[in-house]
Image (spheres, helix red, strand yellow):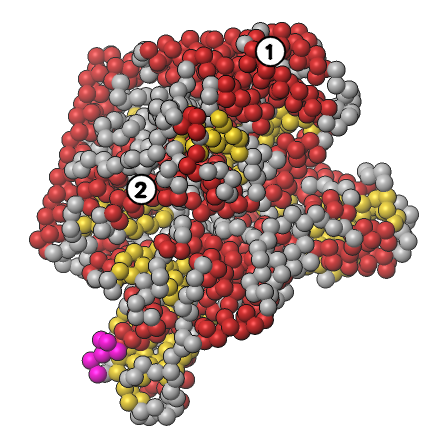
Amino acid sequence: MSIYKANLHRSELALGIDVGSTTVKTVILDKNNQVVYSNYQRHFSKVKEAVAAQLEQIAGVYPGETFPVCITGSAGLGLANAAHLPFVQEVHAAFVAVSKRYPDADAVIELGGEDAKIIFLTGGTEQRMNGSCAGGTGAFIDQMATLLNVTADQLDEMALRAEKTYPIASRCGVFAKSDIQPLLNQGARREDVAASIFQAVVDQTVSGLAQGRKIEGKVLFLGGPLSFLKGLRSSFVETLHLDAGHAVFPEDGRTFVAYGCALSAMKQKEAHKIEELIDKISNASADSAVASDPPLFSYPEEYEQFKARHASHDVKREDFHTYSGKAYLGIDAGSTTTKMVVLSENDTLLYEYYTSNKGQPLDCITEALGNFYKEKSPELTIAGSAVTGYGEELLKAGLGIDHGIVETVAHFKAAAFFCPDVDFIMDIGGQDIKCFKIKNGAIDSIMLNEACSSGCGSFIQPFAMALGYDIAEFANAGLFAEHPVDLGSRCTVFMNSSVKQAQKDGATVADISAGLSGSIIKNAVYKVIRANSPDDLGTHIVVQGGTFLNDAVLRCFEREMKRDVIRPAISGLMGAFGAALYAKEKSSGESSIIDLKALKEFSYTSQTAQCKGCTAHCSLNIIRFAGGGKFISGNRCERGAGVNPKSILPNLYDIKYDTILSYSAHQPFSPIATVGLPMSLHYYDQMPLWATFFKELGFEVKLSETSTRETYYKGQSTIPSDTVCYPAKLTHGHIESLLEQNVDFIFYPCMSYTLDEGESDNHFNCPVVAYYPELLMANNEKLSVKNFLYPFLDLNRKKHVVHVLHQYFSAYASKKAIAAALEKGFAALEEYRSKISSKAQDIISKARSEGKPIIVLAGRPYHIDPEINHGIHKLIASLGMAVITEDSVAALAHTPKLKSLNQWVYHSRMYRAAEYVASQPDMQMIQLVSFGCGIDAITTDEIRRILEENGKLYTQLKIDEINNLGAAKIRLRSLLAAMQA
Amino acid sequence: MAYAEFTVPMRKTHTILVPNMLPIHFKLLIKIFGQYGYNMKLLESTSRTVVEEGLKNVHNDTCYPALLVVGQFMEALKSGEYDPDKTALLITQTGGGCRASNYIHILRRCTEQNFPQVPVISLNFAGLEKSKGFKLTIPLMLKLVYGVLYGDMLMLLHNQCRPYEINEGDSKRTVDKWAERISKLFESGSYRNTKHIYREMIEDFASIPKSQKKKIRVGIIGEIYVKYSPLANNQLEEFLLSEGCEPVVPMLLDFILYCAANTDVSGKLYQYRNIKTAAFRIGYKYLHKKQLEMICCIEESGQFIPPHDFDDLRKAADKYISQGVCMGEGWMITAEMAVLAEHGTENIICTQPFGCLPNHIVAKGMSRAIKNAYPNANIVAIDYDPGATRVNQENRIKLMLANAKAAAMK
């Protein structure tokens, strides 16, 4: 809290109240527009009380004073309406303030608790706010600080000591988490991670908000985070290339909007006595339109029965201080927590350990292991050990653990211990939801949450903290809530505003807590499992994972499922427990695990490097253990790990990509002009056609660069829609790349239709692929009708295509020559297609001769782009499977009966490929889905059905700009385990 | 796939449920269907169960309109209010390259599981799906066109009167009165005398006592369902009225003209001609003539602001985007932004379902070009989906309105 009051007292004062998502700010101006009083406090979501409290303070200083007043801020809207006081929109208030105080400013960037805003003042005034799906705000920074277990201030200090930054997605907190967690687990420097978080916020602001407008000139920075986070400030200044004279941080940045609000209040005719204002605010009652559910428990006895029922699922315990005999150790190095258990020969629990790993699983386990060794009975010998979870490989390498086991399998083992005929397991951990069905004693299908809704367990924590509670207290409050609010089932960013709305409407903390528990369950059931009825799941359901330790969550689940489920008392330790059971199963009688002596001397260093194995240039993290040995992570294939594998099967993704690139070879000797073709969207399907066409006519063909993260940054400032898919976003960078190469023109046709393959109801491209050139033209100033040609073509109508192309290129060639070149182009396309199909056959027969399973990695043509697929095909290959593409086998089957309109060609190939896979015993399909692809909301359901009806497994990998192979790996390894079962 | 089909005898026995997209229009249209022996019922539930049923039954990444429509149907079927053995569902199918063409299949997947006996009827003009018992005859289609015309006229007059009415409820009452009257006209057959009826309508609405206070006109454009349906856009029109604005909502006829024009445009663009292009050209000419007639009647009255001429919309589109961009609402959204800005309605809300694919191109993708051409254009894009809260949306609209008010002061 900070109060500033000047020794002035005049009768004509104006009061501005800014109620943000986390704080309340008040400012009083005198008649010369000078600030005479200002105050700033967090409101912990008790908005009304906090505002009233601040007004009380003002009443203390200015008793009986009369003010014209205005309210602003995201949480101020409801309050103003309820109290019948004037409201001014906060961006507008900021605009008023800036025009008064800094009339020469060119742009304003304001970051608030949950909003980010930009105001452009010169060259066409424009005010922008983040869309409803956008992180990169104060709440985002708080969330990330919590993840690193530091305060925002400490995060700031750390950032100042950074040496490098990693790419982190900041579009939403959940994405960023899935970027950061693997970095931490792999031992990246926390200082670097801190700086990367700030850089992500800057990138988000520059690309998400500015959307194609350059931020330049004199820039004003406002809002809480920008006024106290130095690291964030410097990231902004550096990224925008501002010098000291052009980056302005007003001293009262935090209360600046309240100042603008007070300026607006000046213009109000009506004035209120301060005491009257306090009354109005305190008695403001919003009409309660909040939807609520019945209470979780109607009376305490009901809760007692519920507890007793669940307490019955427990394990026997023995004391490890006195136990003698063989014991088995299991570790679950999860994303946010680390768990360790030791079991006896009779499966009794000797030792358990559960901690939040603070991003350092290695340290946690060495400490826990040390304590265990010191205290255990001397007759206890570890006869086997196993580890599962994100940190599996690191711990195996560092501590000599005997076995690694896929998370899903570990959980199944543990669940079967409590319920031998279990047929459905649901695990909600810190940031993953994992569900799997069990059929015939093996894992049948796995459902993991997509990047979008992950973080569902751990998201309660920030809410609890924001409301000023600790997590256990907060969870318990929900048990007896009278009116649990219905908060819907969406990601955290949306949830924030739902909570805000509920509070505005008068929901209590208890109601919100219960509501959040309900949301977790709804997310899991409707987003992840997509169940229509409880019977879809199974009859013997075991739930586990730390989140289910929360009784409110468990109760919500049973209620949603309309049946009782089993929650083992060690629900939070199930992964480790399963690992220990596995260790016992596989035990050879002794374990190679590090002993006490070695543990005392154990230490490690971590360092980063770039892999030079191939063009992917994976960013490697190398941990060297003092006792010798190292662990490398971040690599996508075996090469980075320093292994030179003898026989990796050729990978059709690489072959396709290289073949597409090869079309820029053999250029004409003396070209008539240069044409640029972007390596993006439909060009990944039609490159042979167009490259051949232009070379035939005597043009030199230049392709844009190989996609990297840099390519994305290059075009970032011209992207108008922040929710379009990543493949489309990358296109902007490819256009820049071609412009850099000084091509005479870029050729990028719009195509509603693609070539009809005769197997679908219609032959559309998706709207984004079809019309993206229109969007590029409208948003990149460097493009003109001279250097950017984007005719509308329907390739199925050759006569028309020739006609249109002749209109464009009559200066270079005759109509006849154009028609001939086009024919050559079509022939080249044909040849390319058959080459890919025959390569696929080669790979299939080679894999079959070596007994390797074959994966059809099904996506769109552009998924062969290394920046789009993030090397997932290599990851699959490294697990010992052969990879082919959907288009290479689509022609081998006919379209099966579908329950939807089959009208997009790229997608129709996947249906046929799925049908083909269904007929091949040694094949499985994995579907790649780009985040934001609306059409895949339809295809995924269809493909799942085609595969599952034929006894195949359905696996989906959702990909985006983030490069999180950790989750993909778990899914792939689970798939492999399921295939082998 | 063997799904329940709507058969001829079902016309007598079944109630056909229809989602309510446009309150004024759809009431007129189902009355017309009624005259042809179809017993239709508009679904007007806006309860929370609608969204919940939607979330349960539809892939959550599917667009919001599908989720709401399916949710509304499922809620109705489960409510017990309708006998599933005597109920059918009607849904439109456009057949373009956007996801909307798949709504019917999404719906059918849900009914198949829960109510396999309930037939789902496709309402389309593209010759996609046919049901034996449901036929769009030429006289019926013609009447529907008139229904749309009168609906558009009533909507326009209502929107231009309601913000200014001195006696609360006058405009609404006048709409109801006319809706009743037009239904009768459809029965008697004298509905074709459009000019005469328009003039009477205009006169009637003009006689509503109104204040002279100037209000900010705010254009509502975007994806068709979200743009019109109060359920989808959180009562956007009501919100704008409460903020002291006049909502400007484009005609439903525009969308029909857009669909008709596209076939013709495709023919020109890709150089082909067939019966379809010819038929659509004739249809387009006819409909456009009817639109001009309406505009003419409004202009001659001098009391109200006429809607834009569809040909102007096409000309405006040509400046920014090709008419070949025809998936979803396609080029029409860009053109509407331009025409609104051109004619002084510079404040525009572009409504869209979260993640709507065509809107990446035609709305967000083109707003920069529009801003360049009309520096005063004040456009805000609002995403709608089950998780987006009203507070969040209204705050953004308020920002747009604050800009609008500041501009009006100048």
Please indicate, yes or no, whether residue A299 appears anywhere in the rendered image. yes
Q: Which mark, by number, is residue B295? A: 1
Q: Tell which subunit mark 2 falls on.
A: A
Name the kind of residue labelled 1 in the image. Answer: Ile
Residue A588 falls inside the magenta stretch: yes
Asked if residue A86 lies left or right of residue A356, the reply is right
Q: Is residue A490 above or below residue A978?
A: above
Is the N terminus of chain B in the top left, top right, bottom left or bottom right quadrant? top left
Q: Which mark, by number, is residue A942? A: 2
Measuring from the top left, give residue A151's x and y in whole percent: 57, 65
Asked if residue A751 lies left or right of residue A876, the reply is right
Mark 2 or 1, closer to the camera:
2
Looking at the image, which residue is at 30% across and 46% down? A944
Q: Calculate the distance from the C-alpha at mark 2 to the C-alpha at mark 1.
A: 47 Å
Residue extent of the magenta highlight: A584-589
Residue B372 falls inside the magenta stretch: no
Name the kind of residue labelled 2 in the image. Answer: Glu
10 Å crowding of disc 2: few (<14), some (14-19), many (20+): some
Q: Nearer the viewer, residue B133 or B91?
A: B133
Looking at the image, which residue is at 23% across and 30% down? A759
Q: Is residue A651 above or below residue A446?
A: above
Total marks in image: 2
Q: Secondary structure at mark 1?
A: helix
Q: Secondary structure at mark 2?
A: helix
Measuring from the top left, give residue A10's x and y in whole percent: 90, 49
Measuring from the top left, give residue A322's x and y in whole percent: 37, 92
10 Å crowding of disc 1: few (<14), some (14-19), many (20+): some
Q: Is residue A933 above or below residue A23?
A: above
